[in-house]
């Protein structure tokens, strides 16, 4: 039995505004998606859309000449992940042959490049293309997007705009007068010149963040002299998930008849171990879960005044003193914090403390007042002369995107975020329909591994996109009130977190005592919060001002219209397993 839309729309032949669309139930509309960036976030969008969507276009505009984001850009010596490699892996895409327990930058970059090649994702990526602006048009339910490609502005459009530009992607020079007057080689950690050679040279490095901590031991090895400008204190932690690392080393040493305590630094997997990971997926999965759980288990430390926080303080303080060794009292006093570990990002710092006390290293704990052609002038007036100056001075945390985004009635996101950003669950923004950001403000920036949160966020975004596609939705706009209440809750939660202690960190936009811009809770807590979309928190507007039920179409489902006999009884089954009617 087939009805035409005219036959069933108005039984009494009265004119009606209701449309009976000539389509099956929830037939997907054509959906055009633009994602900015092809780092881990952009590649996840491409992979998940490819696996789960039909009738769509996706373009990931990437300003660089290759994919990989963080791991493409950060090429400084010693660049590595500080969580175990087998945990810094997409949850569904294990890698059995990681070379080391903590992966180095180039191998991680290769992992993402291999992922893109394996799933044929490069076809979604347009390289050397920098997004400049996105402007919402309520009439069409589209963003008009401007992209700079080889100096020319190209216009594009999309129904769904995803900002996958990462929160550590806009590196910054320090605001020091005269910086660019320096006549030696000037480098930034996140814009490293891989041809740089520091052998037998005098080198200065600015910063005590995670980047400086990884660079110092590498430069110290061959520079004639290294001066580290360290105006802020920081915690150097034991290796993350070190219990698993210790086990790894102990079993290997025991096999060699060595009963001594292993040192806790890097570990190279043997061919045999890689083979076992490859041959025994169950074993590999259990190993990965142990590592991930060890990272997540460390969260207790972030609860202020908890036993775990106190133990971390005592343990790390003693270990830092031990590693610095006898003497070096100024370094101990000026480097070891008084606030609890975790307030500012802790870094394992393999070899960092050991390098700082080497004879060819000087630490300077004074403010830098200016840079002159020969080097750095500190606030005592002393000039430190260098051949090379490294700024490991971090990233701009401008919370609004670096390109213009204009929402309902032309409001600018930059204006809306001044003085404070206003983001819902780190993914959506009131007044900016169909705009999504991956790991935006108040995302999971400080706990656990970044990638699982990225995955759950991409799932969240694509659930929204799918619903828009299936249900004739023109605009999905998060409401202000749930956003306001959420942010009030996060502020309150942070009163009991170590992040709220008296440190300076980029979690607080480098303002001591400033508001925290990270999630209020653990990584698992965040993921649990965004696993399902609370559509009641969104204002939904339909295409052509239509009825919210327009997507019910002609009263049929796809399998009926396409006469797919074997899909006509999906609920008849042998056990109570999930079933679906295909859209
Ligand atoms: C040195 C370093 C070490 C880190 N180590 C860890 C770790 O150990 N564990 C952990 O969990 N996380 C770590 N992180 C965080 C890391 O950034 C994330 O884990 C993850 O790689 C972020 O991926 P992303 O795709 O969100 O962002 P990114 O990797 O930053 O990618 C964003 C992409 O967007 C592109 N882009 C930006 N603006 C534009 C534009 N206007 N137009 C077009 N393209 C644009 C950029 O070129 C880039 O390719 C580290 C970060 C750094 C900097
Ligand atoms: N997994 C890893 O191992 C790893 C490695 C690198 C980076 N990362 C990620 O990237 C984030 C950023 O790390 P980052 O080290 O690049 O940056 P960062 O943590 O922001 O550190 C920047 C450093 O530069 C110093 N600085 C800035 N301007 C200065 C000035 N004018 N004079 C003197 N010092 C100045 C800062 O001092 P003040 O604090 O006093 O301002 C700070 O010590 C990390 O928190 C982490 O999330 C991770």
Image (cartoon, helix red, strand yellow):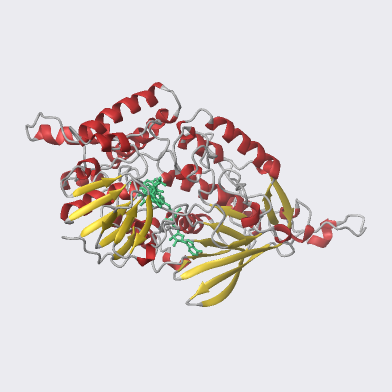
Locate residue 441 relative to residue 219 in the image: left or right.
right
Residue 40 in the image: state x and y as whole percent.
42, 54
Asked whether 365 or 496 is in front, the reply is: 365
Q: Residue at x 48, y 70 (%)?
A: 129
Task: Name the image quarter holding residue 87.
Answer: top left
Asked whether 140 or 219 is in front, the reply is: 219
Locate residue 567 relative to residue 253 in the image: left or right.
right
Location of residue 534 with respect to 107 vertically, above or below: above
Q: Residue at x 17, y 35 (%)?
A: 263
Q: Residue 422: in sight, yes or no?
A: yes
Residue 337 in the image: state x and y as whole percent.
36, 34
Residue 269 in the image: state x and y as whole percent.
19, 45
Asked whether 331 or 113 is in front, the reply is: 331
The quadrant of the rendering that contains the N terminus is bottom right
Task: Name the image quarter holding residue 91.
Answer: top left
Residue 117 in the image: state x and y as whole percent.
36, 63
Locate residue 451 relative to residue 430 in the image: left or right.
left
Q: Residue at x 71, y 65 (%)?
A: 140
Q: Residue furthest left?
A: 257
Location of residue 282 with respect to 174 vertically, above or below: above
Locate residue 526 relative to residue 218 in the image: left or right.
right
Q: Residue 95: in sight, yes or no?
A: no
């Amino acid at each position: 039995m087939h009805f035409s839309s005219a036959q069933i729309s108005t039984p009494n032949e009265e004119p009606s505004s209701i449309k009976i669309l000539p389509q099956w139930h929830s037939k997907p509309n054509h959906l055009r998606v633009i994602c900015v960036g092809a780092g881990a976030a952009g590649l996840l969008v491409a992979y998940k859309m490819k696996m789960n969507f039909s009738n769509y276009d996706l373009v990931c505009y990437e300003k660089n000449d290759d994919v990989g984001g963080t791991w493409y850009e950060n090429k400084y010596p010693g660049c590595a992940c500080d969580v175990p490699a087998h945990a810094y892996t997409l949850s569904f895409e294990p890698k059995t042959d990681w070379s080391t327990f903590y992966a180095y930058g180039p191998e991680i970059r290769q992992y993402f490049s291999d992922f893109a090649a394996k799933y044929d994702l490069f076809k979604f990526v347009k390289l050397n293309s920098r997004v400049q602006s996105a402007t919402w048009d309520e009439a069409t339910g589209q963003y008009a997007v401007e992209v700079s490609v080889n100096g020319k502005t190209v216009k594009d459009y999309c129904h769904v705009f995803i900002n996958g530009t990462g929160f550590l992607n806009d590196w910054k020079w320090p605001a020091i007068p005269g910086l660019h007057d320096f006549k030696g080689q000037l480098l930034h950690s996140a814009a490293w010149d891989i041809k740089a050679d520091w052998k037998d040279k005098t080198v200065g490095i600015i910063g005590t963040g995670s980047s400086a901590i990884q660079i110092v031991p590498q430069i110290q090895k061959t520079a004639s002299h290294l001066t580290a400008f360290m105006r802020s204190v920081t915690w150097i932690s034991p290796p993350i998930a070190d219990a698993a690392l210790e086990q790894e080393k102990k079993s290997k040493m025991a096999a060699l008849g060595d009963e001594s305590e292993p040192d806790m630094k890097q570990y190279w997997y043997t061919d045999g171990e890689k083979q076992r990971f490859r041959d025994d997926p169950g074993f590999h999965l259990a190993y990965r879960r142990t590592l991930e759980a060890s990272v997540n288990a460390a969260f207790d430390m972030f609860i202020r005044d908890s036993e775990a926080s106190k133990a971390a303080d005592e343990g790390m303080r003693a270990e830092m003193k031990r590693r610095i060794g006898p003497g070096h009292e100024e370094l101990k006093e000026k480097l070891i914090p008084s606030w609890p570990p975790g307030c500012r990002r802790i870094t394992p710092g393999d070899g960092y403390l050991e390098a700082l006390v080497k004879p060819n290293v000087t630490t300077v704990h004074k403010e830098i007042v200016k840079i002159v052609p020969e080097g750095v002038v500190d606030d005592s007036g002393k000039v430190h002369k260098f051949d090379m100056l490294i700024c490991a001075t971090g990233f701009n945390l401008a919370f609004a995107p670096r390109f213009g985004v204009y929402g309902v009635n032309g409001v600018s996101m930059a204006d809306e975020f001044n003085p404070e950003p206003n983001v819902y669950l780190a993914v959506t923004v009131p007044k900016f329909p169909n705009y999504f950001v991956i790991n935006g403000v108040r995302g999971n920036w400080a706990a656990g591994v970044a990638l699982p949160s990225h995955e759950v966020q991409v799932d969240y975004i694509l659930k929204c996109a799918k619903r828009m596609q299936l249900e004739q939705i023109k605009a999905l706009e998060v409401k202000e009130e749930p956003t306001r209440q959420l942010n009030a809750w996060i502020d309150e939660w942070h009163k009991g977190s170590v992040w709220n202690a008296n440190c300076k960190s980029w979690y607080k936009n480098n303002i001591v005592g400033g508001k925290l811009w990270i999630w209020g809770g653990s990584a698992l807590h965040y993921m649990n919060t965004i696993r399902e979309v609370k559509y009641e928190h969104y204002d939904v507007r339909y295409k052509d001002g239509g009825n919210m039920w327009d997507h019910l179409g002609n009263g049929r489902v796809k399998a009926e219209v396409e006469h797919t006999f074997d899909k006509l009884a999906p609920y008849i089954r042998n056990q109570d397993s999930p079933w679906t009617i295909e859209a």
